[in-house]
Amino acid sequence: MSESMSFAALPARRLRIVADPTVRALLANALIGLEKETLRVTPQGRVAPTPHPAALGSALTHPHITTDFSEALVELVTPALSQPQAVLDFLRDLHLFVSQHIGDERLWAASMPCVLGGGADIPLARYGRSNAAEMKTVYRRGLGNRYGRVMQIIAGVHFNFSLPEAFWGPFQAEVGGSQDGLSGVRNTGYMGMVRNLQRLGWMVPYLFGASPAVCKSFVQDATTDLDTFDANTFYYPYATSLRMGDIGYQNRQEEGTGLKANYDSLDAYTRSLTWAIRTPCPHYESIGTKVNGRWEQLNDHVLQIENEYYSTVRPKQLTDWMEFPTLALRRRGIRYVELRSVDVNPFEPLGIGLEQMHFLSLFMLYCLLLPSPTISPRERRWIDSNEVLAAHRGREPGLLLECSAGPIALRDWGEQVLAAMAPLAELMDAGGDGAYKAALRAQQLKMAEPEATPSARILAEMRARGEGFAQCARRLTQQHWEGFRQLELDPARAASFERLVAESRARQARIEAHDECDFDTFLARYFAQTEAQPVALRSPFAPAGAPSEETA
């Protein structure tokens, strides 16, 4: 057995964890949540110039409908649920509700943006008059100043996955303990999952990448080596996900500052990000912070805040009011893992389908059960290189990636990994409907037949119809929009969403009425928090001195 094959195979003792019917019952209650970004566009396929519709509620406080970088970039957030179909049903209902309140605008069907007129056409997201709202907008202005606004409106799907707390006891019994109890086992297990999701992360753009081409209006670099598909479209012939490649949003400052998050442990991870948000970066000093009375960025540090660090996967914990995400992780450990490398699939009205949900759940569980040594500097270079190669050239015949055994063909490695997942799929489907095995077989077909991948299907449609990227995406956008118009939102769900709209507005008003200082003081207090010293900004939703579960 080759070293690469032995890397792919799950140890028998770890499969035994899932073989236990009691553990499988726990895994049936694993939680899945989706965060789907989507651009509001005009019927002509351009970024909508309109504000976030008031009928959708407050983007600052609504739990399920918010905005990302731009007023036009809607983010739809499902609750974490144990049934993938229930998650998709909720996402569908969010689509229906939003579609009913945006007039003749549409929700763009692709990850890469529609026709652009430059960064000036992309309005920053606004969240009201409070200090918390101003902070969110200044952060986005800083992103625009650092990386350009065009990069910030690339859309994706974030797949969130967590296991029941009771799972970690059986896991500990098989893989070893922790001096920090079950919370330490959970943190160690999730960080191992994160490392393996990075090692095998190239599989996600290969299997699910759906952005092989882009409108020429998106590309700012006149020296690009992208090929010309037609007068208005760039592409790479074997690309899978330009979103995940060099033209997508990346933290370029790491090349000059040496920034790279350390995934050896949760402590190492939080310390590396804390260093980045505390350390000035000469590259950003020229932007300034407060210039002529307007804040251009939150600070001139390597990262303004932790969320700026681009990564394909993140360990996450819910935050209290104005709490650093790193401090939430240090105080309460990892609650779930967020996979961020999933493209919006233009062929799916919701951007993601049930089969894909089952596979991603299986893939994340596999990455948890697979042994996960720390990542060496050499392996880190391989991980980064493999990701870009898979994004730019993933379907290229004979494409070689790097692993510990040396160069290996992408398809050979992928076939080994998928074969190694089969026993896990068999166990997960015991007594069920075979959904995991079916999802796995669908991915094995893509690995054997690259033309079955979404990226290849998109290029094939563009060629067959004589369409460029923008035309193809606009046609699919219109198709999905017409489909949503034929559906009716369940009255009970509609009423629930209307209540959330009203509640979100009331919460925003409460935050605005609660401000006790000017923005400069607010920001200084925010950045003064430490692990030993909670943030000196009392939550609008808790009595004085009481903790809060509220986030903003």
Image (cartoon, rainbow, N blue to C red):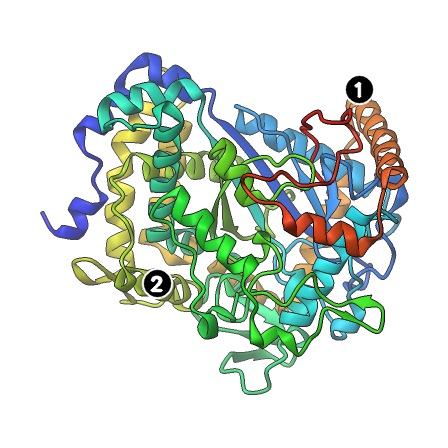
Which residue is disc 1 drawn over?
A: 492
The image quadrant that residue 117 belongs to is: bottom right
> Residue 226 appears at what percent x and percent y?
51, 79
- Which one is nearer the viewer's eye here, 459 or 358? 358
Residue at the left extreme of this rendering: 1
Disc 2 to disc 1, how far (Cα)? Answer: 47 Å
Q: Residue at position x 24%, y 55% from top?
A: 412
Helix, strand or loop at mark 2: helix
Which residue is disc 2 drawn over?
A: 386
Tag of residue 63: none
In this rendering, which labeled residue sits more in front, label 2 or label 1? 2
Q: Is residue 285 above or below residue 353?
A: below
Helix, strand or loop at mark 1: helix
Q: Residue at position x 65%, y 62% from top?
A: 152
- Which one is nearer the viewer's eye here, 402 or 93? 402
Q: Is residue 543 visible?
A: yes
Mark 1, residues whose alpha carbon is within 10 Å: few (<14), some, or many (≥20)?
few
> Residue 395 appears at what percent x and percent y?
38, 63
The image quadrant that residue 484 belongs to is: top right
Q: Is residue 436 left or right of residue 41?
A: left
> Residue 402 appears at what percent x and percent y?
25, 63
